[in-house]
Image (cartoon, rainbow, N blue to C red):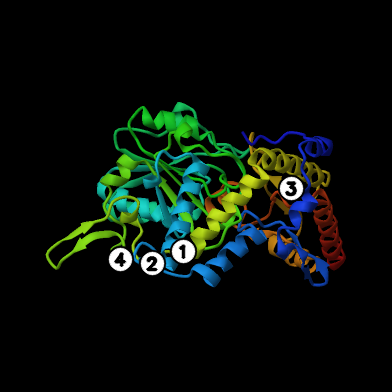
Amino acid sequence: MGRVNNHSAAGVTALGWDVWNIRRDFPILKQKIHGKPLIYLDNAATAQKPHQVIEAVNRFYLEDCSNIHRGVHTLSERATKAYENAREKVRQFINAKSNKEIIFVRGATEAINLVAQAFGRTTVGAMDEIVLSSMEHHSNIVPWQMLCEEKGAHLRVIPMNEEGDLNLDKVNLPFNERTKLVALTHVSNAIGTINPIRKVIEAAHLRNIPVLIDGAQSAPHFRVDVQQLGCDFYVFSGHKLYGPTGVGVLYGKQSLLERMPPYQGGGDMIRSVTFEKTVFNELPYKFEAGTPNISGVTGLGAAIDYVHSVGLEQIEPYERSLTQYALEQLATYPWIRLIGRPRERVSVISFVVDGIHPHDVGTILDQEGIAIRTGHHCAQPVMEHFGLSATCRLSLAFYNTREEIDALVGALKKAREVFSNDGA
């Protein structure tokens, strides 16, 4: 799943792929930056939105704006229906058993924090352990550090090799009777590695250890089936899946969610309230206190519809082909150093340019209308592993083209010339 290999442009055409037609769905791609056509290669940070998503959000505010689950009037009923329809779309998208297992949150970060607080605080004790990997995003490190500091517990880390793959032999799977949770990224946001998470989940479950998977970088690129994976929790963000910002999903097995106390208190997460006692609502509402991001959830539902209309079975091979082309073009130049060569990857590529700081590279590319990400990518342990403080990162989506990659390489050559002349 997701392995990069060489797919010809003709093969993509045979699949019926028409990238130029797809690009028409994304209004932002029509603009110019510094007089140059926008080339957006920062999709791992956030993906652009098709007009179908933008229109769904606008339609909510223009026609259906109301609070949900509370009113008997028409607007409230329409808003509630759209919100709950989106929950069902998410359930189908990741193949959860029940809508009760789908919790709407602000994003993957809040979902991880919810599990850390509602599950972790009631499960983890002094001298217990939580296992992470060495390639986690900060949002899948810091909440667990905070929990460990509070409880007197410890973090254990699965190491990574020089290629950017996890070392998953028995020595490096530090599971024992003190391990209370494994929290692992499905895909590295810094170098694109697809981790063999089923292997980890199976090993953890042999010891009855629950597993949380950070799917922020996997859900947009290939099909995810949480029942097939067997994970206990799965999180992802809407804005990386061509949906609005400020909305995301926590999937949790119903048996676990039912045992977990609420993360926050307030309206809609209760059955009844007196000054003596509060009775909490059923799943999934127990974890959705207050007025949610109704427009965002509606937009996420539209984004899932859009991805289905394009087809993950077509997105995946096209992005593999584009990634392989980018790797080949960048590897042509000895002054471009690719960071990490994982066995399987998505369309995320980190690199450095000899003699030029990544921030300077990013600034020069911006003058050419090209948007990439530079910095530590909220994955400083990964940077430390490779002996770097920052990299340049390009991350591709299904609306990107080979021509854009050619333009990127041309702009990198220009940056190289500028700094060579400055050095003279």
Q: Nearer the viewer, mark 3 or mark 4?
A: 4
Measured Cα–Cα span from mark 3 to mark 1:
44 Å
Report the disc number at residue 173. none
Q: Is residue 55 above or below residue 260?
A: below
**Left or right: 237, with 262 as reference point:** right
Check disc 2: other Cα within 10 Å, few if <14, some if 14-19, many if 20+: few
Q: Nearer the viewer, mark 3 or mark 1?
A: 1
Q: Locate residue 225, reporting x and y percent.
A: 50, 37
Report the disc number at residue 267. 4
The residue at 14%/61% (across/down) is 277
- Residue type pointed to by label 2: Thr
Residue on which the image places disc 2: 291
The residue at 46%/64% (across/down) is 293
Local SS, label 1: helix
Measured Cα–Cα span from mark 3 to mark 4:
53 Å
The residue at 36%/38% (across/down) is 210
The residue at 41%/62% (across/down) is 77
Q: Nearer the viewer, mark 2 or mark 3?
A: 2
Q: Are marks 2 and 4 in contact (CB under 8 Å)?
A: yes
Which is nearer the N-term, disc 3 or disc 1? Answer: 1
Which is nearer the N-term, disc 3 or disc 4? Answer: 4
Inspect this view and state whether residue 255 appears. yes
Along the viewing direction, whichever of 160 and 147 lies nearer the viewer: 147
Measured Cα–Cα span from mark 2 to mark 4:
8 Å
Measured Cα–Cα span from mark 2 to mark 3:
48 Å
Residue on which the image places disc 3: 337
- Residue type pointed to by label 1: Ile
**Left or right: 415, with 117 as reference point:** right
Residue on which the image places disc 1: 294
Q: Locate residue 246, reporting x and y percent.
A: 50, 63
- Residue type pointed to by label 3: Arg
